[in-house]
């Protein structure tokens, strides 16, 4: 999908960011993300950022505002996507596909290719923060960028 006058207006702030720009926004429009686990905040974050297709393995989350071109559908746990984000415990996806996830939330921790270090249930506010952080990480990866290579300064 190319940038239309409506999408330019909608995503004007992202278009101004050098790491995203017009090319990055078009890349997001054409990308797909497989989201596993109950993660309504992550789904909302992805839709608001301009993701093209969100594939969910559970119940479709209610998303109030999103681009008219945004698509969301329920799929099998092993559906093909540009990136998988597992915000469940990771076991169902690993069992279905034999693949290890790049990121997951388990025992209240955001895991990016590592094992949990501590146990304990996450508080609701921690879970919300982890969903948003994981969604942000996924967006950077869909853009083909190292999510930790950019620092923004507010002077």
Image (tube, helix red, strand yellow):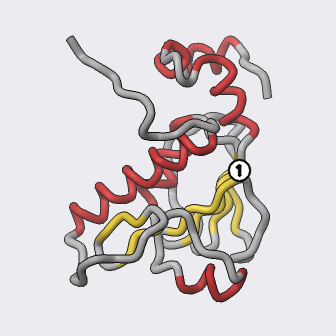
Q: Is residue 57 above or below residue 139?
A: below
Instruction: Indicate the position of residue 49 as horizontal and vertical percent values.
Output: 53, 36
From the viewer's perspective, tell me whether residue 52 is left or right of residue 13. Answer: right
x 34%, y 23%: residue: 152
Quadrant that contains the N terminus: top right
Instruction: Indicate the position of residue 82 as horizontal and vertical percent values.
Output: 72, 53
x 72%, y 43%: residue: 31
Q: Name the residue under label 1.
A: 32
Is 101 or 128 nearer to us in this picture?
A: 101
Quadrant that contains the C terminus: top left
x 40%, y 66%: residue: 111
x 52%, y 39%: residue: 146
Q: Is residue 66 above or below residue 16?
A: below
From the viewer's perspective, tell me whether residue 139 is left or right of residue 31. Answer: left
Instruction: Indicate the position of residue 116 as horizontal and vertical percent values.
Output: 34, 77
> Is disc 1 surrounded by few (<14), some (14 to 19) or many (20+) residues within 10 Å?
many
Is 4 or 25 nearer to us in this picture?
A: 25
From the viewer's perspective, tell me whether residue 34 is left or right of residue 131. Answer: right
Helix, strand or loop status at disc 1: strand
- Could you say which quadrant of the image residue 94 lies in? bottom right
- Could you say which quadrant of the image residue 74 lies in? bottom right
Q: Is residue 78 above or below residue 51?
A: below
């Amino acid at each position: 999908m190319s940038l239309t006058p409506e999408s330019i207006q909608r995503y004007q702030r992202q278009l101004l960011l050098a790491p995203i720009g017009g090319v990055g926004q078009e890349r997001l429009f054409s990308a797909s993300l497989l989201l596993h686990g109950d993660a309504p905040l992550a789904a909302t974050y992805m839709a608001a950022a301009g993701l093209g297709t969100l594939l969910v393995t559970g119940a479709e989350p209610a998303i109030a505002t999103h681009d008219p071109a945004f698509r969301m559908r329920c799929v099998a746990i092993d559906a093909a996507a540009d990136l998988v984000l597992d915000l469940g415990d990771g076991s169902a996806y690993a069992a279905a596909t034999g693949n290890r996830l790049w990121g997951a939330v388990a025992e209240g921790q955001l895991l990016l290719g590592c094992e949990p270090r501590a146990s304990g249930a996450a508080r609701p506010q921690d879970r919300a923060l982890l969903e948003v952080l994981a969604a942000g990480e996924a967006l950077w990866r869909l853009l083909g960028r190292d999510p930790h290579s950019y620092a923004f300064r507010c002077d």
